[in-house]
Image: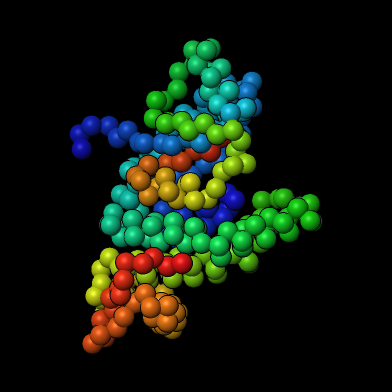
Amino acid sequence: MGQEFNPKILGFMCHWCCYAAADSAGVARYQYPPNVRTIRMMCTGRMDPLFIIDAFCVGTDGVFVGG
Amino acid sequence: MEEFVRKILVKVGINSDRFALEWASAAEGPRFVKLITDFTTKIKSLGPLGEPEGDSKDELLIKLFAARNALEKAKLRTGLGKLTKGFRKEGDYSDQIIKDKVNEKLAKSISAEIARNETLLRIQKEGPIHFDDLTQKIGMPRTDIEKYVAAFRKKGLVAEADGQLSVTSRKSEG
C-alpha cells in the first residue's frame, strides 16, 4: 500500500438538519475530513435499509446517516 | 431501522461499526464536524471494506448482493414495517426493547431470506454446482437449503442434472 488509506464514506443527510449543519460548518470554516461523499435527502425518514446495503455493494467503506 | 441494518451487516459478515446513524441539528455545525471526524477515524482504523472481515472480497460481495436482493422483496420489508407499528402502539422506543424485538421477530427471517437469496445467486453465478458444495459455502443447515432449492425448482428457476444444480432461464424470481 504505502499510501495512507483514504476511506470512501457515503453520507446520507437530511436537508433540514445535518446538511444544514454541514453547510454552516463550511461557512464557519471548520476543518473536517474530505472523505464523505454527501447525498442530500429531504428527510432522513426516507432512509431505507436497501440504500445502506446498496452502498456497501458498490464499494463504500462506511455509511453515515445524519438526521 | 438501525438495529435491523446492523443485524443484516453482521449476518453478511461486515463490522456493523461501518454504519452510523447520528443526529445534528442545523445549528450544530461543530457537532457535525466532530461526528464526521470521529466516524472517518473509525473507518480508517477498520481499513478497507472486506479486508479486516477475513472473507475474500468475492465471497463478501455475493453475501452482500444476496442481502440486497432479500431487502428488495416484501418479506423483510413487511416484517420491519409490522415491527415498527408495534413500537408505535406501545410507545416504547428504548434501545433495549428495539434490540430484543428485532432479535425475537426478525433475526430468523433475516438469516433465512439472505440464505434463500444466496442459494439462488450462487446457482446463477457458480452453477452448475453440486448440492454439497452449495450447502458448504452458504453454511446453513442442509434441510433449509433443500427447501429453498425445491421451491426454486417448483418455480422452474433451477434444474438438476446428475446432482448438479443450474439455472433454467434468465428470468429472475418474481
Q: How is the image coloured?
A: rainbow
Q: Quadrant of residue A55?
A: top left
Q: In the image, B28: left or right of B66?
A: right
Q: Residue at x 72, y 50 (%)?
A: B93
Q: Establish if B30 lies above or below B77.
A: above
- Looking at the picture, tell me which residue is in the foreground, B69 or B32: B69
Can residue B42 be seen here? The reply is no
Q: Establish if A2 lies above or below B71.
A: above
Residue furthest bottom in the image:
B162
Q: Quadrant of residue B108?
A: bottom right
Residue furthest top in the image:
A28
Q: In the image, B20: left or right of B25?
A: left
Q: Residue at x 42, y 67 (%)?
A: B173
Q: x, y (%) of residue A32?
A: 45, 22
Q: x, y (%) of residue B11?
A: 46, 61
Q: How many marks?
A: 0
Can residue B157 be seen here? The reply is yes
- Looking at the picture, tell me which residue is in the foreground, B140 or B122: B122
Q: Quadrant of residue B27?
A: top right
- Looking at the picture, tell me which residue is in the foreground, B168 or B68: B168
Residue furthest left in the image:
A2
Residue furthest right in the image:
B90
Q: x, y (%) of residue B85?
A: 72, 56
Q: Residue at x 42, y 41 (%)?
A: A62
Q: Residue at x 38, y 60 (%)?
A: B63
Q: x, y (%) of residue A26?
A: 50, 16
